[in-house]
Amino acid sequence: MPDTPALPFVCACGGLSGEVTGKGVASGTHVACYCPDCRAGQLYLGQPDPAPGPVDIFQMSPEYIRITNGAKNLAVMRLGPKGLFRWYAKCCNAPLATTTSSPKFPFAGFDVARFADPAPLGPVRTRAYVPQDSGKRKHEKPGPAVLGMIRRVLSARLSGRWRQNPFFNVDTGEPVAPPHVITREERAALYD
Ligand SMILES: [Zn+2]
Ligand SMILES: [Zn+2]
């Protein structure tokens, strides 16, 4: 089997760019997420409203993300004090990836819109939080997302590769940019 090539990504203005390594592409899971938080994250950053559609996400290990240009433009916001870290490029507010708040749980949901060519990511495997007629939400085929995450987290932890993380100083556990928690009022405007 030939190795999977690295896949380049770039923010909207070119101020921040990099690549997901071939191993990252090969081990990630393509997910369509319909959850209100993913939508709110897009709206806060001035992106087009994805609703009623999903936000297209590539779930992967952060260790395979290389920021090769403009790392100084990394910024991070949270929708609430306990919310996921939502990383973006502050040069143009392009969403990049969501992560947990600790590098010890290495997870990234990369925004597929940053890839010029998403074809190498393969088809969507899991559709998460899909709205139902009943008003509830349901995961469709959650298996690939759940199993993929468990497999990647274990692999990164056991190998020590979790220590490569472009979003954190792994020695201190601190994010490389100060997290900005949006206000309750800001938050309220992002959900309707
Ligand atoms: Zn930019
Ligand atoms: Zn979501």
Image: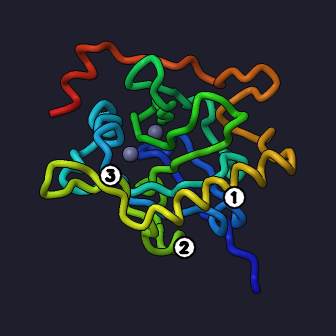
Image quarter of the N terminus? bottom right
Q: Which of marks 2 and 3 is nearer the N terminus?
A: 2
How many neighbours does mark 1 have within 10 angstroms: few (below 14), some (14-19), or many (20 or more)? few
Identity, as a three-letter code, of the amino acid under mark 2? Pro
Q: Name the residue under label 3.
A: 129
Residue 151's disc number: 1
Q: In this view, does 100 lie to the left or right of 112?
A: right
Q: What residue type is labelled 3?
A: Tyr
Q: Is residue 127 above or below residue 81?
A: below
Residue sitting at 18 percent across and 53 percent down? 52
Q: Identify the residue at horizontal 43%, vertical 41% (top origin).
A: 95
Q: What element carries label 3?
A: strand
The residue labelled by disc 2 is 120
Distance from mark 2 CB to nearest ligand 2 atom below 8 Å: no
Q: Which of 35 and 54 is in front in this view?
A: 35
* Residue situated in front as seen by the camera: 20 or 62: 62
Nearest to the eye among marks 2 and 3: give it. Answer: 3
- Mark 3 Cβ inside 8 Å of ligand 2: yes
